[in-house]
Amino acid sequence: MSVPDVRVSLSRVPVCLSRVSVSLSRVSVSLSRVSVSLSRVSVPLSRVSVSLSRVSVSLSRVSVPLSRVSVSLSRVSVSLSRVSVSLSRVSVSLSRVSVPLSRVSVSLSRVSVSLSRVSVPLSRVGRAPHRTGASLPPLLAPRVRTRAWGGAEPGQAQDKFGGKRWRRGGVAPWGRGLGAAMRGAARAARLGAMAATGTGTGPATGTAHKRPHPEPAARIGTHDGTFHCDEALACFLLRLLPRYRDAEIVRTRDPQRLAGCDVVVDVGGEYDPGRHRYDHHQRSFAESMRSLRPDKPWSTKLSSAGLVYCHFGAQILAALLGQPEDGPVVTALYDKLYENFVEEIDAMDNGIAPAAGEPRYALSTTLSARVGHLNPRWNDPDQDTEAGFRRAMELVGSEFLERLDFYHRAWLPARALVEEAIRQRLEVDASGQVLELSQGGCPWKEHVFQLERELALPRPLQLVLFPDRGGQWRVQSVPTAPHSFQSRLPLPEAWRGLRDEALSELAGIPGCVFVHASGFIGGHRTREGALQMARRALELGAGTEST
């Protein structure tokens, strides 16, 4: 290897190379008649920090033929000031690389490059310094094509739609001279920004790459002013659908603005599912879940929340749970969530009381009540409701998803446990009216009522045994309805309110722990003792229903 008349002057350049591993194998570099002339070239670099990180470059079987190229270097002035280059843990492997350079001529005149306050964070980048005995100037080292942005061919960039184009100013598929290297460095930041945003130059002709115009975001319309729980839940549920995931919420009563919305809830005075209009305030509206879906039992008048849930609830649950829309899991949870979450909101918004007569106490902490408290107070100077409506959507949405998670992961699996206990009830007591659950804390009440109907039990269940977390056992009466405080068979009245020895002596069963004052539940230290309490309650049969 012969490199004639090459002079390199570096002044005040601190270079720190640490743990650099370079492996060059079977490298043949022939430079013949190389003349490089640089005239009036000034390259001031100041405050430049280059940190290379986690980059690995592997070049294998690369052949770059450059012929008839003459490079002349004359009167070259290179000024490097305060340049710090740190290369750490660098590993580059070049194998079977052949670079013939012949008659290379490069002329650069009046070139000025100024880089100031440039920071390029890259670390652990491998590079291969030269171990051929003769050191080539870095700017004369061969350039090769590399893959960029994962999917493009070498030397190409890939846009966000999968198209490929040559990177103008990037690494070209042929060797580059000093000017190309400088231009590539100047354009590096711009190319990175293009890759991140999916923009960039077109092919080599300079034609810009045309991106398709995105479709406008969908719009969900609802009324402005004071908001309520039903439209907050309706908007949240709609945004769980893919088509409305990024939808804009338009709060207005302007008919023209509502007409431009893709779906309108709780305003507009019409119910037309074909046009996605879901209001319930019009005088003619009297729809319920039963009227729209005759297979459902609920007759409560629907609000906007119930209308959206009726039409889209199964689709929403199927997507959230990854289950078939018509499968048993979605069907069971659809009914459960309406009966125990959405129906209450429908009734509250339509002014339907939970029971006839004067209520004994006020219900002031329902979800509908808490949403109402998010509205501005009547005497607040700022009566803007936009921020409060967003909070209302977050509140009802989080509670809906939490309830779904509980029913899916706790309530639904309990059904199998209760069903198995019902089938084995005769092994617990010959009456068939005592149910034993193997695990405490299981939500069993609603499953008992449903399975009694499905299995057509000849006698209703009266008492349930289960262990508590402390290792003791409980005996609890089955309520008259899933949400009732009244019991089918409360524990004997004489036991109620007693504890420990006094209770054990009165009941004639050692080891009793307590009986609640209403008689709906009692405790014993052992399973056998709890079963004796249940059998004694069945024998007495004199307990009165708790009030």
Image: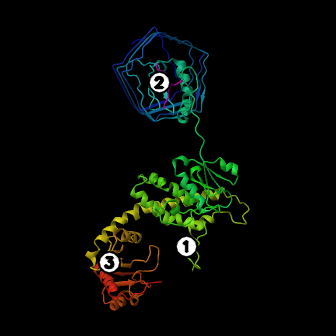
Q: Is residue 274 left or right of residue 481?
A: right
Q: Quadrant of residue 427?
A: bottom left
Q: What secondary structure is found at the residue carrying circle 2? A: loop
The residue located at (39%, 17%) in the rendering is 63
Magenta stretch: includes residue 163 = yes
Q: What mark, if any, has residue 354 been given in the picture?
A: 1
Q: Can you see residue 394?
A: no
The residue located at (57%, 70%) in the rendering is 365
Residue stretch rendered in magenta on the structure: 162-173
363 in relation to 198, above or below: below
Question: Contact (CB < 8 A) between labels 1 and 3?
Answer: no
The residue located at (69%, 58%) in the rendering is 384
Q: What residue type is labelled 3?
A: Val
Q: Earlier in the sequence, mark 1 or mark 3?
A: 1
| Camera-nearest residue between 108 and 143 | 143
Q: What x and y, as percent, mark residue 338?
A: 49, 63
Q: Mark 2 points at which residue?
A: 155
Q: Which of marks 1 and 2 is nearer the N terminus?
A: 2
Q: What residue type is labelled 2?
A: Gly
Tell us which disc is closer to us: 1 or 2.
Answer: 1
Q: Which secondary structure dominates the residues rendered in magenta?
A: loop
Q: Mark 3 points at which residue?
A: 434
Q: How many labels does the image show?
A: 3
Q: What x and y, as percent, mark residue 480?
A: 43, 77
Q: What residue type is labelled 1?
A: Pro
Q: What x and y, as percent, mark residue 79?
A: 57, 23
Q: Can you see residue 96?
A: yes
Tell us which disc is closer to us: 2 or 3.
Answer: 3
